[in-house]
Amino acid sequence: DNCSSVPAHKVHEYLLHTYENFHGCVAKLTENEAKIIVGMDGVVSVFPNDKNYPHTTRSWDFMGFPLDVERSNTESDLIVGVIDTGIWPESESFRDDSGFGPPPTKWKGKCQTSDHFTCNKDTIGHGTHTASIAAGGVVKTASFLGFGQGTARGGVPSARIAVYKPCWKDEGCFFSNVLAAFDAAISDGVDIISISLSFGRVENLARPYFIDPIAIGGFHAMKKGILTSASVGNHGPSLRTVGNYAPWLLSVGASIIDRKSTTKVRLGNGMGTSLNTFDLQNKTFPLIYGGDAPDTTSSNSSLSRFCLPDTLNRTLVKDKIVVCDALVNGTEALIAGAAGTIMHFVQPHDIPYSFPLPASHIHGDDAARVISYTRKLTSTTPFGTILKSVELRDTSAPYVASFSARGPHPLSPQILKPDLVAPGVSILAAWSPIASVTGIEGDKRSVPFNMLHGTSMSCPHATAIAAYVKSFHPTWSAAAIKSALMTTALPMSNAMNEEAELAYGSGHINPSKTTNPGLVYDANEGDYVKFLCNEGLSDAGIRSITGDNNSSCPENNTTNWDLNYPSISLAASLGAFDNTFMRTVTNVGSSNSTYKATVTTPQGQSLAVKVQPSTLSFKSLGQKLSFSVRVTGNIGMRALMSASLVWDDGQHQVRSPI
């Protein structure tokens, strides 16, 4: 665990980095050397240095969290650690006009510099965006090229931001760098960690906790009382796609707020979805179907109808609007010199993506009409135009974004993931002016603010509210803060979200209720170690997570669904099931209070829930009381059944999904 196993005769060549909090290191090893070292005494695990990737304002007001909400006088002492692609410090969102003063005395970090950037320049933009969502200052005249005009701000604008850069353009985010970022953030004294990165699977299987750098880093942060807020990824709406699923992490999905934009295609007045900032001034252009403009010199010419790279004939496409049979990023149309692109695809149309040229994503009858008009066999050239987007109000909001990754948990289905959802679509926040607006080569636009979509955007919303709670309750554990966010979340309906709790977890984050949850479900390092033991991890596997060579599993363990989690989940086989869950709540509301349990079960479900005792009477703050939840039923044709448990004392409603 102290890296003494690295070949001594080449230690300076092999040893790249030694961690402070994880009892580990990064070393250059051959496959054979790694196999030898993994069997040595004191070595708990060896795994390759793979890559993570970024998951890529009305949102705060939409959630009922105005700028003048009650705030703690210690908010400016909070330090939000953001692990991402860096930051553009000169952004208006990070100006110190209010006189922050020196960093808090607990801050032990420093600003690293190099020849290529001052402090931590962000050439990608992603890190600047996420940091400003969490704790950016107030900017009153922000917009993305005129869209979303208004005041941009972070959730805790008085808090400090410490940025850790494990990600580099064209390189991704190596695991060793991500662990180093956690290591530094913990040592520096941050209060909350926000990480909007995802990782790949291992041989198409869910990544085990003991070779997951975010799970390992988050565990060590939790030991120090630091909650890690992490994005679940953008691989929805397919099931079992959720990432960052360790139970000690706050796993955040993405919701849609009441801002949406539509982009008209003027032919038959078709309507599409995109965020088109380009104004063609009503000028019309010839239309051409991508399938009718193949680059016959390319081996990919048969794919031209999809407008994929190296498929379009530039001579045929130049200065025309090209119609494509897929939702693509617009790179090929831009390179080919197209005036714009109209795309259609059988894909959800809830996300107004931004493109490097005039574009609209259409569907249904509109798509059929455009293609029919474009390909009609007459001597008349079809013409059309794409109008600049207009912003509308989405009265159905909030609901879960189609891209937001879904459960169930791929490793531990008795843990419901995601934990909750937060705004992640059409989020206006700061941007690096040297970063491309769309990340596409050839897009030369430079903006101080950008409007993005992704669980990368929802994660820092939850991070900010976790920091907000900590500003009022600095001694609460990471699990207690997480519980406060989950049990006060707004219930959501499966009418708008087919996958129900597998899409939204406990519900939509509800900032104004989080500082006074009444009861919390607390957990500590020992509870999580028991959970890992019940997951079947070996002592060596557990030690690779905890960094403690004394970690081991007791002979007699509780069942693995008895982790004191704020939600209840069970993976049941076809037929009857009967399971009892144990939970313990800590009173953080009124010293003398009595809570009564109410269970709500939707009609038509073969599901029964019994809570014992059904009344909890507290005599003091900090008092803990336990209860059991017996869940019985029969899995028939319904693949998903759910209920809701609420503890109510007349002032607080502590809600847990089942």
Image: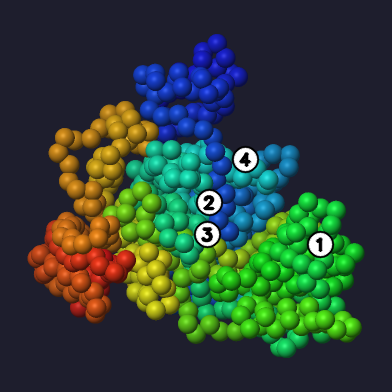
Q: Which residue is mark 4?
A: 112
Mark 1–mark 2 distance (CA, rounded to whole Å): 37 Å
The crowd level at tag 4 (other Cα within 10 Å; few <14, some 14-19, many 20+) is: few
Tell me the kind of residue under disc 4: Gln
| Helix, strand or loop for disc 3 | loop
Q: Residue at the location (66% across, 67% down)? A: 327
Q: Who is closer to the viewer here, 392 or 650?
A: 392
Tell me the kind of residue under disc 2: Leu
Q: Residue at the location (25% across, 57% down)? A: 573
Residue 234 - label: 3
Mark 1–mark 3 distance (CA, rounded to whole Å): 32 Å
Tell me the kind of residue under disc 3: Asn
The crowd level at tag 1 (other Cα within 10 Å; few <14, some 14-19, many 20+) is: many
Q: Which residue is mark 1?
A: 294
| Helix, strand or loop for disc 1 | loop
Foreground mark, 3 or 2, reads 3
Foreground mark, 1 or 3, reads 1
Percent x, y for residue 29? Answer: 55, 23
Image quarter where the N terminus lies is top left
Question: Looking at the rendering, which quadrant does residue 384 occupy?
Answer: bottom right
Mark 3–mark 2 distance (CA, rounded to whole Å): 10 Å
Residue 290 visible from this viewpoint: yes
In the rendered structure, the answer to whether residue 90 lies left or right of residue 494 reads: right
In the rendered structure, the answer to whether residue 317 lies left or right of residue 65 reads: right
